[in-house]
Amino acid sequence: RDSHIYLFTMKLSVATFLLAVASTANAFAPLSFCERQSASPIIMSMSSPLNEGNNNNLNEGSNLKSRRESLGWMLAAAGTAGMMVSTTSAAQAATDVEDFLKTGGVSQPMGVSGQAGKSKPEIGVVLRDGIDITRDSKSGNVGAEILLKDAASPKEYMAALLSFTSPWSLAKGFVFDIECRDADTGDGVFVMVTPETTKDIADIPNSFFANQLVAPTGRFSFYGTPTDMKIKNSRVDEQTGYRIMDVSFSTLAQSTQMEIPRKARVAATIPKGSNQVVMLVASASATRWKKGSEQIIDKTIQSFRASPAPPTSLKLRAKERDPSLL
């Protein structure tokens, strides 16, 4: 929508400028033969010695006035174009900043200025070729299949099935892998995969997870590395064996560089046969966390499951968008 408004504004500005140029060309263009012929009686009647000086002054004054008016048109058109483009750009920036201040994140889908110059976050997710990410609109169940390093063969990969329930729709855009997000509130959940580890999920230090969450190329680092990262209440769920952690941190706004407090809950597991940790990260602004988002996020985290995919004869290949990961 922002890009359409911007293009319309540019087209309108260019049209105004061309109209001004055309008016200027007409003002400076010499009279045609027909125009000279039709004007000759009038010119002859005014060409007596008594009127010659006055006529010259009159013609020069008319030409000067016409030129001044044309130049005024050009300057006005140029000024209008600049003002309209500046206003549109400022409006886009203000929209992104206002959304970030309200939600602690960039709107989804991001505006033009929100995505400009941003690279895709590196969160370790390798989607399996031929398998789409799905979400049932009624139940909210999300399903996906990813590739993980095979612990027994470092150069080989294994497939893992992921599932969780999300009240938010799948996020669309080049910066998203497996992510669901509320465009209005900024609440959201995404999957990330860590590098290999030799430890069991219960023995991995909190610092390992913190470093992944605040990585410069991570999901929360669009406008700078998150600050004040703290992991609290880290425990292993007795029923599922998954590591559950509560996280608090601050993210930076796009233009104001203001810190926005945010809270998250993380579920982490190492699927059997792999040595990579698969994490589900659900977060909301600190304000919304206190107003009920925590309960919604907890249900999403509790629904998370990651397990080895049943063996098939199909070859394991990464999606074409990132084939270099294999």
Image (cartoon, rainbow, N blue to C red):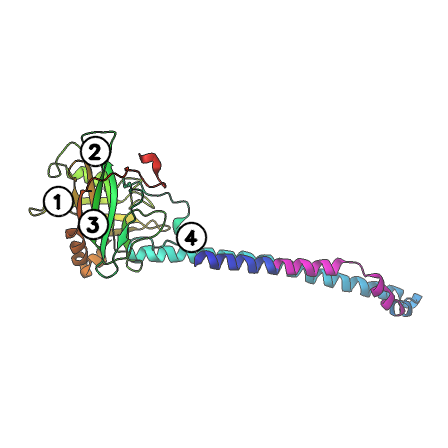
Provide residue 256's location: percent of width, then percent of height.
36, 51
Residue at mark 3: 163
Secondary structure beneath label 3:
strand
> Where is residue 4 shown, x and y percent of the image?
47, 58
Give the vertical position of 237 relative to 153 (above or below). below
Ranked by sequence position, the earlier of labels 1 and 4 is 4
Residue density around tag 2, few if under 14, some if 14–19, many if 20 or more, within 10 Å: some
**Residue type of the residue flagged with mark 1:** Tyr
**Quadrant assignment for the N terminus:** bottom left
Circle 3 packing at 10 Å, graded few (<14), some (14-19), many (20+), is: some
Of tags 1 and 2, the one toward the viewer is 2
Q: In this view, does 35 lie to the left or right of 238?
A: right
- Do we see residue 18 in this rendering? yes
Q: Please give the range of residues in magenta.
A: 17-41
Disc 1 residue crowd, few under 14, some 14–19, many 20+, Cα 10 Å: many
Quarter holding the C terminus is: top left
Q: Nearer the viewer, residue 174 or 158?
A: 158
Write the residue at 33% across / 41% down: 319
Label 4 sits on residue: 112
Q: Which of marks 1 and 3 is in front?
A: 3
Distance of mark 1 from mark 3, alpha carbons? 14 Å
What residue is pinned by disc 2?
150
* Upstream in sequence: badge 4 or badge 2: 4
For marks 1 and 4, give the CA distance: 39 Å
The answer for how far apart the CA atoms under marks 1 and 2 are is 20 Å
Please name the amino acid that badge 2 sits on.
Asp
Could you say whether the residue bearing mark 4 is in a helix, strand or loop?
helix
Looking at the image, tell me whether mark 1 or mark 3 is earlier in sequence order: 3
Would residue 256 be counted in the magenta stretch? no
Furthest toward the front, the residue is 313
Residue marked by disc 1: 242
Q: Is residue 84 visible?
A: no
